Amino acid sequence: MQVESQSADRESGGQAGALVALIVLIGAVLAAPALTSRYGFMAFAIVYAVALIAWSVARSAPLKFGVIVALAIGLRVAMLFSEPRLSGDVFRYLSDGRAIAAGRNPYTVLPDDPRVPHREIPTIYPPHAELLFALVHWLTPWRLLLIAADVIALFLLRRNALAYALFPPLIFEGAWNGHVDGLAAMLLLVAWTYDSGSAAAASVGLKLIPLAAIPALLIRSRRRRRFLLTFALVLVLPAIPFLAAGSFMSGMHEYATRWVFNSPMYDGVFALVDSLQVADHLKNIWTAIKDPLRLELVSRFVYFHLYSDFLTRCVLAVVAVALIVRFRRSPAASIGALLICSPALHPWYWLVLAPFASGVWLWLALCAPFSYLLYAGAPKWVVYALCYLAPLFIAWLPLSRRGTSIGESPSSATHPRTAPDTPQS
């Protein structure tokens, strides 16, 4: 009887601690916009650290599903009228949407809104995203759409709904800063749950990152031909009007060849390629080949690409493909492998794998917002330690495996679930 009493006391104490952590998390979420607006990215990082620690405890609070949904909506609605402070990408969404609504092609015109970052570059977003921006090109309705997407995901993730409802990156990057990635995550979860090629295509059409999860979806699918056919049709059809109009996603070339942010993989490979003078050696090899074969016509193209940055991106692309093949049964691992190999790794990119996240991928997604410290002037090694070494260490701790993860590893799954509330296999 004494042992049972002690066990009950521990359980009661754990529940009380979870509820206290929930209150702290709510306070951190509500305080973040004002503190960030006044004190900048360093203040956000501090508030975010509080929210992260509180989330790790609060995710095990004993709440009913209806309360969880209400709590998720309430936390997000609290962000509706706060100015986005972490990123200006949502203003690009709205500008693109207004351009299409006015009959202009966002792939050929530049935005005139001074809040839009990199206004000199045409939009990088795929056609599905552009059409959605045209339908919803006001900030508050756009945020309401993202909140609705999170609520749908909660119903698909009933068993782990609280962890998803309180997931700090979703609240800060989604409802507050308006990133489309949470919507892409929900569609990818629908594709996973219902073996839907159309939902998968819509997810990829909003953000290219979900492409990494397509092998896992195909392995899981019971109707692979149908999946591929619907995927191809839904992916291609919305692009046809833009292709017919001329320029198509030209800004993506600028992004893919120039952007570098918060990527230790890029920094490491670049340092190696540069120190070994790989580009110079390849130029010498090509010169020895092209002179006797008289390949002057293609030499300009070849030489143009033989520099350390381009070679580094090529190496990372090959590694990413190899890792996606290696982790092809797991959406979280496949997407995570792609992200780790990306030269530019913004924190909101991790939202795409959030419904499937567990283990180290969960903690990498959670710690990604510490990269905002780079904007506050923090040393790169400090940011890398927080964003990458800390998640590895936390995932290694036995304590981190207690409670509820957002998603179970789907690597052993062989068929889709039959209903939203069926536990993932």
Image (cartoon, rainbow, N blue to C red):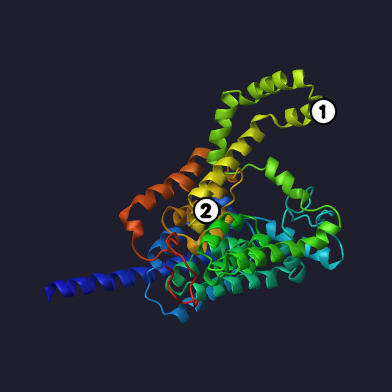
Residue 142 in view in this figure: yes
Could you tell me which secondary element the residue under label 1 belongs to? helix
Q: Position of residue 221 (x, y in %)?
A: 53, 66
Q: Quadrant of residue 44?
A: bottom right
Residue 46 in view in this figure: no
Of the numbered discs in the image, which one, if any, rests on residue 297?
1
Crowding at label 2, few (<14), some or many (≥20) Cα neighbours within 10 Å?
many
Taking depth in this image into account, of 27 and 358 the one nearest to the observer is: 358
- In this rendering, the answer to whether 373 lies above or below 74 is above
Kindly identify the residue that appears in the image at 52 percent across and 59 percent down.
Answer: 216
Q: Position of residue 92 (x, y in %)?
A: 74, 58
**Kind of residue sitting beneath label 1:** Leu
Q: Position of residue 50 (x, y in %)?
A: 45, 58
Kindly identify the residue that appears in the image at 47 percent across and 46 percent down.
Answer: 388
**Kind of residue sitting beneath label 2:** Ser
Crowding at label 1, few (<14), some or many (≥20) Cα neighbours within 10 Å?
few
Position of 235 with respect to 215 (left or right) is right
Position of 115 with respect to 146 (left or right) is right
Taking depth in this image into account, of 126 and 241 the one nearest to the observer is: 241
